[in-house]
Amino acid sequence: MKKLVLVALTIFSVSLGLSAQDFEGIIEFKKQEGSNVENMVWYVKGDLVRVDQFDPKSRVLKSALLINTKDSSVTFIDHHAKTYQRNVASMAPSILTGCVIEETKNSKEMLTYTTSEYTVKLPGDTANYSCWISSGKFGFFKTAAGLFGSTNNYFNYYWALEPKSGTMPMLVTKSNAKGEETGRLEVTRVDKK
């Protein structure tokens, strides 16, 4: 009987440990504003994230960022110029202050993740942002987006939500005062390893 209880507790502990692990795998983003389309592929392994950015016209790899979420370092690699630059950044995304944030009652499934909608409006700005946030196990994302955020306006609106650790935007849309969509950043692929 003691052995059976011990085996059951071991199986239960292992299953809890496996379910508590953070995301590792590949996430692909597509950013579109007008006719400009940009693709980014994030490769996540432990504390390391590699972000490949592709030329919108030729789909050729133009640059990569190597992000270490443990020491907040970022290495930029320019494949065309064959150069790199390493920075240890303080986690300081462009914080948008004074935003009016509203959590709507809307939710939907996106790539097998349940998302909740938040709207973000910056006073004086004619654009409105709608962020669909997943509460999956994306523990790397808040730090990585903070280090990457200054180059991607959509991530700055995610940061305006003061996000909880483990969350990630699956879709961020930008619309004008008339409600017409003018841009979007969306996750098009999630491959968990």
Image (tube, rainbow, N blue to C red):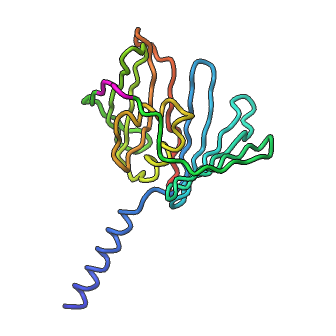
- The residue located at (48%, 31%) in the rendering is 154
What quarter of the picture does the N terminus occupy?
bottom left
Tell me if 40 is positioned left or right of 21 in this view. right
Residue 70: x %, y % from top left: 49, 59
Q: Looking at the image, which is closer to me, 121 or 168?
A: 121
Residue 111: x %, y % from top left: 44, 42
Q: What secondary structure is the magenta-colored segment mainly?
A: loop
Residue 99: say if magenta: yes
Q: Looking at the image, which is closer to me, 192 or 179?
A: 179
Residue 84: x %, y % from top left: 72, 48
Residue 12: x %, y % from top left: 28, 73
Residue 7: say if magenta: no
Q: Looking at the image, which is closer to me, 74 or 89?
A: 89
Tell me if 24 is positioned left or right of 160 in this view. right
- Regarding residue 109, the answer to whether it shows in the image is yes
Tell me which segment is drawn in magenta. Answer: 97-101
